[in-house]
Image (cartoon, rainbow, N blue to C red):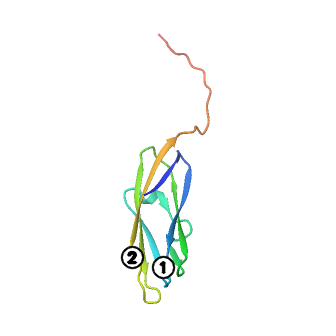
């Protein structure tokens, strides 16, 4: 599970680290699915290539627009490289509002009661 916790109207970025322990290059296509998938994004693209015995990263961003918790699933589907397929991987994405900072304040004067 990848958690995105922050204030209302903020954008939070996370990196998912992928390790390739094999001696072959692996490549993945990423897709976002689920109820709130439209609020998540892949700012550096939806593909990642991982050289043999190295690691790669996929960036995921979430902009908190609503007070309710958000959920989606990140699915990484392997592409054949050098005749080798990697395993399909899934990650649960969860977001939650922890604080609300006002965008501004307005002062006004008004009678509290009128007959």
In the image, which disc is placed on residue 54?
Answer: none
The vertical placement of 96 against 49, above or below, is: above
The residue carrying pointer 1 sits among few (fewer than 14), some (14 to 19) or many (20 or more) residues within 10 Å by Cα, namely many
| Residue at point 48%, 44% (across, down) | 97
55 left or right of 107 in image: left
Q: Mark 2, mark 1: which one is toward the viewer?
A: 2
| Residue at point 52%, 75% (across, down) | 48
35 left or right of 5 in image: left
> Camera-side residue: 98 or 111?
98
Q: CA distance from mark 2 to mark 1?
A: 10 Å
| Residue at point 47%, 86% (across, down) | 81
Q: Position of residue 111 (x, y in %)?
A: 55, 16
The vertical placement of 49 against 8, above or below, is: below
Query: How many tags in the picture?
Result: 2
Q: Position of residue 60 (x, y in %)?
A: 51, 62
The vertical placement of 76 against 4, above or below, is: below
Q: Position of residue 96 (x, y in %)?
A: 46, 47
Identify the image quadrant of the N terminus.
Answer: bottom left
44 left or right of 70 in image: right
The vertical placement of 83 against 28, above or below, is: below
Q: Position of residue 70 (x, y in %)?
A: 42, 51
Return the residue found at the far bottom.
83
Q: Secondary structure at mark 1?
A: strand
Return the residue found at the far top.
115
> Camera-side residue: 110 or 52?
52
Residue on which disc 1 sits? 27
| Residue at point 49%, 49% (across, down) | 65
Label 2 or label 1, whichever comes before in sequence order = 1
Q: Secondary structure at mark 2?
A: loop
Residue on which disc 2 sits? 87
């Amino acid at each position: 599970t990848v958690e995105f916790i922050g204030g209302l109207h903020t954008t939070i970025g996370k990196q998912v680290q992928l390790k390739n322990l094999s001696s072959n290059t692996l490549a993945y296509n990423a897709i976002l699915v689920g109820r709130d998938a439209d609020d998540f994004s892949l700012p550096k693209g939806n593909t990642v290539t991982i050289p043999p015995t190295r690691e790669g990263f996929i960036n995921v961003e979430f902009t908190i627009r609503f007070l309710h918790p958000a959920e989606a699933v990140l699915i990484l589907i392997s592409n054949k490289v050098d005749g080798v397929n990697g395993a399909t991987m899934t990650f649960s994405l969860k977001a939650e509002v922890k604080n609300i900072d006002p965008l501004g304040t307005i002062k006004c004067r008004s009678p509290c009661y009128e007959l």
